[in-house]
Amino acid sequence: MNQGFLPADAASSASDFPQGVFHSPFRPAWWLRNPHAQTLFSTFFRRPPALPRERETFHLPDGDFLDLDWHLPEAWTNGQPLVLVVHGLSGSSDSHYVLGLQAALARQGWGSAALNCRGANRQNNLPRAYHAGASEDLQQALAHMQQRFPDSPRAIVGYSLGGNMTIKLLGEVGAMAPVFAGVAVSVPMLLPLCADRMDQGVSRIYRQHFIGVLVAHWEEKMRHLERAGNAAAASRIREQLMRGPFRSFWHFDNDMMAPLHGFNDVHDYYSRSSSRQFLRHVSVPTLVIHSHDDPLMSPGVLPEAAELSPSVHFELCREGGHVGFIEGGSPRDPRYYLERRIPEFLLGRLPR
């Protein structure tokens, strides 16, 4: 039995559950109980806060680059906390949940940098993109933040695929983590099970949307590389695209993502990139927020209690959808649980 999957009528006391797994106090807004409504409401109806941000491009050792969008409150100075925020699949620094969190962090006086993963907001230089296992790019971004503001304690927050990268990084580096705390939300911790779930029922609608966005991205990357004079790289991408049309993530990840990112095949990609195996090695306080009814994954992704290090606080919600967690208010003025809970957690772990 997967002890990480708690019964829907579970009590709220932490002592009732396996060590490290806690039943969340989150309750969905009465007008937004359906998991698909929780998942999609903000995409269609939220107007993200308008934040003044500074775009910074920094270069990577392999010849590529990453873009960071900084938001530093007016009174912020070097020495005050900074948070790296990492978006999910098909997102960017302009995603509503990224902007919402940056605004919430600013209200408690913290600065933040929203990472645009490779190719997320504009085409990058190499015939590759970001992927579920690209934790090295997060490490490069944190190192850059430390170099720019050496006196500021740092934390990291990742959503969905960005949460998978976050957990993987924290598990890989263990006690050497360059952050005082981490948060990961709605994480596809076992990629094979998530790929299977996306082939079932209503989830197939999400699958086709994501694959359509990704194919369009790779087609544009191919044209970008052609314009840049890199005909060999463009030809390689064209060759992989001709293996479509892609009817599942198993197909897309095997014929596009794996070969273009140095994996043997989809099984190698999923095995090496799934973050659940890294939870036992996390050494800094880390909050993982997950929902029973996430329509993009099955309960089987949830870890056993023995897989959680003592540093991991796994908060399990009965409802909430995928990166939804809208807790109240009204349709015109909703309240976002993540933008209350994440700053609160990080504040409580800040070194004194």
Image (cartoon, rainbow, N blue to C red):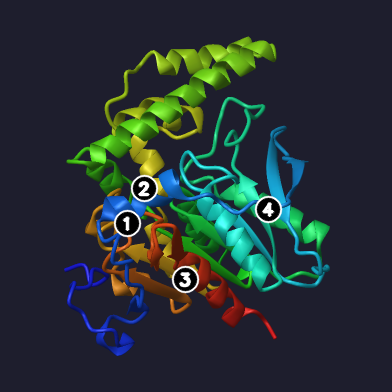
Task: Compute the Cα span from label 1 to label 4.
Answer: 26 Å
> At numbered mark 1, what does the secondary structure look like: helix, strand or loop?
loop
Residue 115 visible in the displayed image: yes
Label 2 is placed on what type of residue?
Leu
Q: Quadrant of the N terminus?
A: bottom left
Q: Are marks 2 and 1 in contact (CB under 8 Å)?
A: yes
Specify the label residue 246 is tagged with: none
Please tell me which of labels 4 and 2 falls first in the chain. 2
Task: Compute the Cα span from label 4 to label 3.
Answer: 26 Å
Q: Residue at x 65, y 14 (%)?
A: 230
Please tell me which of labels 1 and 3 falls first in the chain. 3
Specify the label residue 287 is tagged with: 3
Q: Which mark is in front, 1 or 3?
A: 1
Label 3 is placed on what type of residue?
Leu
Q: Are marks 4 and 3 in contact (CB under 8 Å)?
A: no
List x then y, in percent, for residue 149.
Answer: 81, 62
